[in-house]
Amino acid sequence: MAPLLKKLLGINLVLVILMYGLLIFGVYAVESAARHLIGGGEAFADRQKVWIMLGSVVFLITSLIDYKWYKWLAAPAYIIGLILMVASVLFGNEIHQLKIGTLYFQPAQFAIASGILMMAVCLHYLPNYNAIFRLPIVKVAMIGLIAGIPFLIVVATGDMGTAIVWLPVMAVVMLAAGIPYRYLILMAVLGFGMIAPLHYVILPIASERGAGRIELYLDMLHDRDVDISDGAYAPYWVSTAIGKAGWKGTGWNAGEDKGSLHDKKYVPWKTAHNDFIFAVIGEEHGFRGSILLVISYGVLFVASLFVALSSRDPAGRIICSAIVALLFAHMFENIGMCILLLPITGIPLPFVSYSGTFTLICMFLMGLIQSVWIHRKTPVEEVVDDKQPNLYVR
């Protein structure tokens, strides 16, 4: 059997069905959510279809290439990601996007994807060349350095939503890399212990917009009076649209006759197709549609973690686990801010929100998981210096 055909037949169909199920559902959700924008919902849905077709090519190519070859791209991609992030701070628009032709590109999303590859490559290959890299504290330092630089750049831009995504990614990478539990517990305790002090340190230096969102969230959390015609407008109406939907919801693309708050433009209509798309989904499809969406994500994550467990080497395990952490963080943040579980951060819902470059990146990441699955039985040559003492101590 030809190697290419063998690889195609070895694709994990569960992941393919789940990913395209979310993408197709997202197209219909975007069409309804973008109805008030110039061109109407159909125009945005058609654009999203184009991004999905481009992403399908990226997904297929990424899947069929053995992920061991991506180690040569990790460092250049990571450096390019950092350069683009700095460029977005200096030359980007108000939300730090770079304009390439007629397209807007978010470098922070590319930086996270390249950072995942960089961490996987360093944690897998460096310990084979020098025993010092087997030390847990050195592994933690490598993860902190690789993820910390883009994290600090994102924090400096005030994009706390994207910055927060890095935290679960780093935690899961440490777990997948075999960092002893005592290190993880110690860092978790220190992290929780710093929440209160950081609140008083970050808020004074944070952007006025970011600090205002945090203060507003705390006010709403404690049932204090807020102005729903100003700062509290978005969280109030977004959560109200979901809360009033009931079991069945108003129905897809519902109008005023069904009592749709989105049709009346109460849900922030300029960002309903990306940041607040879950509010539209929740209102139109009710609790049953919302819970089915969450279950679909859950099955996708579990299937991806199964691929991680089936990986032939630590690099594949780290890649799959980190991607699951990234997608879960995006899902949790997006849904959490729509139901007042988290402050408004402005972050897309993977595979569902209208987002060109983010859709491409998500499909590239799913291609990496497929590559790990397809090549899980391919032999791997390890170069280990037996003269180096084993300093890995749990």
Image (spheres, rainbow, N blue to C red):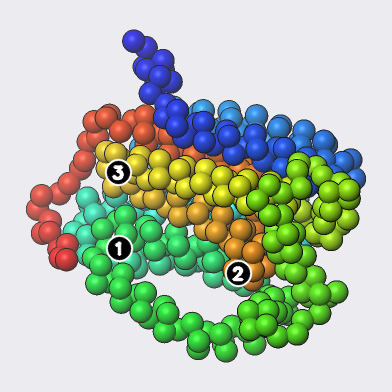
Between circles 3 and 2, the one closer to the viewer is 2
Question: Counting other residues with Cα less than 10 Å from the Cα at mark 2, is it few (<14), some (14-19), or many (20 or more)?
Answer: some
The reply to whether residue 142 is visible in this rendering is: yes
Secondary structure under the numbered disc 1 in the rendered image: helix
- Residue 330: x %, y % from top left: 56, 56
Say which of 122 and 222 sits in front: 222
| Residue at (82% x, 44% y) in the render | 254
Which residue position is annotated with label 3? Answer: 309
> Which amino acid, mark 1?
Lys
Residue 88: tell me if it is visible: no
Q: Distance between the residues labelled 3 and 1?
A: 20 Å
Residue with the mark numbered 1: 139
Q: Distance between the residues labelled 3 and 2?
A: 31 Å
Tell me the CA gap for discs 2 and 1: 31 Å
* Residue drawn at (42%, 79%) of the image: 192
Which residue lies at the image location 21% right of the left edge and 40% below the top edge?
A: 382
> In the rendering, at what x and y percent does residue 146 appear?
43, 61
Tell me where residue 237 appears, x and y as whole percent: 77, 65
Sequence-first tag of 3 and 2: 3
Q: Disc count in the image?
A: 3
Q: From the viewer's perspective, tell me whether residue 202 is left or right of residue 70.
A: right
Residue corresponding to mark 2: 342
**Disc 2 marks which amino acid?**
Leu
Which of the two residues, 352 or 141, is positioned nearer the viewer here? 352
SS label for mark 3: helix
Up/down of 309 relative to 330, above or below: above
